[in-house]
């Protein structure tokens, strides 16, 4: 429910802007507010769980996320929606880390791969289904139902947690002083980073004074938080977890997964809608079969982990992800729906080889009392890198489109025969449609310009897929930094501090 809300709103933004009588650019603040608040709380959720008690905090998060979802759907103007989305992000940020901590404390190491496989269905499939579900709801009902669908699920979730979840002794409520300085630096650093990444493309990145100020505050806050948290006696987040090599490498790898997952989930529907003219629903349907691939493969991965070391599976996952992205870099304007679906299925299916093994190996050498902080930082890395991935994807498309246009324009000249041939055929086509001789020149120029823009855009998307493929191949050697574990998750892995 919470992960779904990071992507389901994207396709509803034009409808929200129109219904609330605001611009699309202003409506995107509803997404920015959610991501900023979510990123901040992800980091400190372990501390909040210690102060309130993990079960109590988990139930508060589910209940208030549900209430805020209802209020978002009832919003009558944009300021109301932004405020309720920010509150939704604040309470939603505590769900993922608490869920992981509960799994870590409930299941012994040899059974964690199966537990993480179940939750991976939600964590990986939700961002994939978000645009599909959001597109269908907004096209056939109202954007408000994008939020209202959370209400019955949230009510059922609160009742289920109240009945089934119990806190172990180390996760129960206990007194803890408030690290005001550390908390303030985290809010400053991560809040400004999320806003900068979400608004950077629209505001021309460092050409904008607003983005430069956010960048300065972000770096100051993050570096200041790291320095403070490493020296204070009772930090709001215990960074000692990064002293464990498996956790440090695992957090880096899950960040890479988030980067690839969210960036690729943006590229395919964006190409479908903006370049070849699909509706929001049809563009979302391109993503849906990829979710089926994940669902089919995840049980298989659980069996593989019983026989093969997790680091081998992870390395293989990043390699085939790179190969899938290279395979996807063959977009053309005449591409059919089925081919687009195959491209997306190849990309999404690879995630099954990454999420579960990384989740298992990351925590294998951590002491139980650090699970709360570790789960918070693990989720934070995935979400923050996912946000960066979305920004990188959109920026890369813009930059590569401009580069491709600058290269292609040299061939749009009467001295280049293919250009003359295209010009001639276009003129004939418009004449057959009944265009007057007086309007032919303008019509031909417009037709060629439209084709020029579309061709440059298609090439830019191919360049983006090539870039992300190279990034996946570059990550493969990092997998060998993980310590070898006994297949099946049983037994103690070698020390990795």
Image (cartoon, helix red, strand yellow):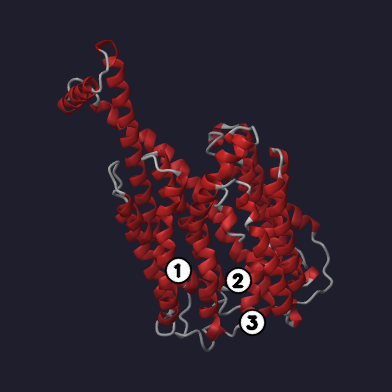
Residue 137 pos. (x, y %): 54, 50
- The vertical placement of 105 against 49, above or below, is below
Which residue position is annotated with label 1? 354
Q: Secondary structure at mark 3?
A: helix
Circle 1 crowding by C-alpha within 10 Å: few under 14, some 14–19, many from 20:
many
Residue 478 visible in image: no
Circle 3 crowding by C-alpha within 10 Å: few under 14, some 14–19, many from 20:
some
Q: Nearer the viewer, mark 1 or mark 3?
A: 3
Which residue position is annotated with label 3? 106
Q: Earlier in the sequence, mark 1 or mark 3?
A: 3
Rendered residue at 74%/72% (across/down): 54
Q: Secondary structure at mark 2?
A: helix
Residue 458 pos. (x, y %): 33, 41
Circle 2 crowding by C-alpha within 10 Å: few under 14, some 14–19, many from 20:
few
- The vertical placement of 240 against 390, above or below, is below
Q: Secondary structure at mark 1?
A: loop
Q: Nearer the viewer, residue 177 or 121?
A: 121
Rendered residue at 39%/65% (across/down): 349
Residue 303 pos. (x, y %): 42, 82
Q: Nearer the viewer, mark 2 or mark 3?
A: 3
Which residue position is annotated with label 2? 243
How far apart are labels 1 and 2 at the CA level? 23 Å
Q: Earlier in the sequence, mark 1 or mark 2?
A: 2
Quarter of image, res 404? top left
Q: Nearer the viewer, mark 1 or mark 2?
A: 1
Residue 254 visible in image: yes
């Amino acid at each position: 429910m919470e992960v779904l809300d990071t992507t389901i709103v994207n396709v509803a933004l034009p409808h929200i802007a129109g219904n609330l009588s605001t611009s699309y650019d202003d409506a995107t603040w509803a997404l920015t507010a959610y991501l900023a608040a979510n990123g901040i709380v992800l980091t400190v959720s372990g501390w909040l769980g210690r102060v309130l008690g993990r079960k109590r905090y988990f139930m508060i998060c589910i209940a208030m996320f549900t209430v805020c979802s209802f209020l978002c759907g009832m919003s009558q103007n944009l300021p109301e929606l932004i405020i309720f989305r920010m509150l939704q992000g604040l309470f939603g940020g505590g769900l993922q880390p608490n869920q992981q901590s509960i799994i870590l404390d409930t299941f012994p190491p040899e059974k964690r791969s199966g537990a993480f496989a179940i939750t991976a269905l939600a964590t990986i499939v939700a961002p994939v289904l978000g645009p599909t579900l959001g597109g269908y709801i907004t096209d056939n009902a109202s954007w408000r139902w994008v939020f209202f669908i959370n209400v019955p699920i949230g009510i059922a979730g609160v009742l289920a947690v109240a009945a089934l979840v119990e806190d172990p002794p180390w996760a129960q409520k206990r007194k803890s002083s408030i690290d005001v300085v550390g908390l303030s630096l985290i809010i400053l650093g991560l809040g400004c980073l999320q806003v900068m990444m979400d608004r950077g493309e629209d505001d021309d990145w460092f050409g904008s004074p607003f983005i430069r100020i956010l960048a300065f505050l972000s770096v100051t806050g993050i570096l200041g938080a790291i320095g403070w948290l490493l020296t204070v006696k009772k930090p709001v987040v215990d960074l000692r977890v990064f002293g464990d090599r498996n956790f440090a490498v695992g957090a880096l790898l899950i960040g890479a997964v988030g980067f690839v997952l969210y960036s690729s989930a943006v590229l395919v529907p964006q190409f479908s809608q903006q370049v070849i003219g699909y509706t929001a629903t049809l563009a979302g349907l391109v993503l849906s079969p990829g979710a089926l691939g994940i669902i089919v493969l995840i049980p298989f991965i659980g069996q593989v982990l019983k026989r093969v070391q997790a680091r081998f599976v992870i390395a293989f996952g990043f390699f085939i992800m790179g190969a899938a992205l290279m395979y996807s870099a063959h977009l053309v304007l005449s591409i059919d729906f089925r081919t687009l679906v195959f491209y997306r299925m190849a990309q999404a299916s690879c995630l099954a080889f990454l999420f579960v093994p990384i989740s298992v190996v990351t925590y294998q050498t951590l002491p139980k009392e650090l699970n709360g902080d570790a789960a918070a930082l693990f989720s934070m890395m995935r979400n923050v890198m996912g946000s960066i991935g979305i920004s990188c994807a959109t920026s890369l498309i813009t930059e590569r489109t401009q580069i491709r246009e600058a290269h292609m324009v040299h061939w749009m000249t009467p001295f280049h025969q293919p250009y003359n041939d295209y010009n001639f055929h276009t003129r004939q086509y418009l004449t057959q449609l009944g265009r007057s001789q007086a309007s032919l020149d303008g019509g031909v120029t417009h037709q060629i310009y439209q084709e020029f823009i579309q061709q440059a855009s298609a090439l830019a998307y191919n360049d983006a897929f090539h870039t992300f493929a190279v990034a996946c191949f570059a990550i493969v050697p990092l997998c060998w930094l993980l310590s070898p574990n006994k297949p099946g998750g049983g037994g103690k892995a070698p020390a990795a501090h």
